[in-house]
Amino acid sequence: MKTLNKVVRGLTAVELVACALTFALMVVCYFISVVNRNIIKGSMPWTEELALYSMVYMVLLGTELGLRDGTQVSVTALTSKLEGKTAGKVLGIIARLVVIYFVYMMFRNGNALVAKQIKTAQTSPVMNIPMYTLYLSLSISFGLMMITQVLMLIGEIFNIPMDSITKVDEIIDTVFGSKKKEAEKE
């Protein structure tokens, strides 16, 4: 279990860093684009394209993190009334199975789309990046979602605490907040 916790925490740290980097890249690209358009009166179309691709990766990876820690929008009218009861656990398992099925279908179709893009060798209009790199975001994010949702389902069925998977904020504090804690001690 300790090895699994380390793997999940490491994977989460990589996801968080990837989200932060893609967000920073998106902001920088849009800033350059706005400055060029409004001050220099020039055009740099590659900034818009790179910002868009960064946004796609950031949103899909963020969706995985949000789905994992339960911050996604959900209707809890029924589940909150059944919390702690057997019917609530069964309903939670059914809901998790539906999510896993949806994520699996998106993963499968995302992989098919990537394979098609590799065969056609289509490139992006401005930067000439292979389009499969953009569509690979579907495979990566939905693959990660499938792994974490299956782990959470196993945890629900066998009453295994899943805090190492679901407590993303604690992982953020561990990964990024450790330097603050060290500075506070000194």
Image (cartoon, rainbow, N blue to C red):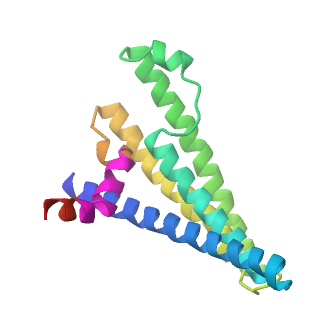
Residue 42 position, x and y percent, is: 85, 86
- Out of 180 and 79, give the one closest to the viewer: 180
- The residue shown at (33%, 64%) is 10
Residue 24 visible in the snapshot: yes
Q: Which residues are magenta?
A: 167-180
Q: Quadrant of residue 117?
A: bottom right
Reply above or below: 92 against 137. Answer: above
* In the foreground, 185 or 61: 185
Please identify the quarter of the rendering in which residue 23 is found: bottom right
Report the side of 144 relative to 11 (left or right).
right
Residue at image position (54%, 55%) is 62
Residue 138 x, y percent position in the rendering: 63, 61
State the image coordinates of residue 16 (x, y, percent, origin top left): 44, 62
**Residue 123 visible somewhere in the drawing:** no
Farthest residue to the front: give it.
Answer: 39
Q: How many marks?
A: 0
Q: Position of residue 88 (x, y in %)?
A: 44, 18
Vertical comparison of 58 with 164: above or below:
below
Q: Is residue 173 magenta?
A: yes
Q: Is residue 126 magenta?
A: no
Q: Is residue 13 above or below residue 38?
A: above
Judge left or right: residue 153 versus residue 72. Answer: left
Q: Dividing the picture into quarters, in which one does residue 72 lie? A: top right
Q: Secondary structure of the magenta portion, mostly? A: helix
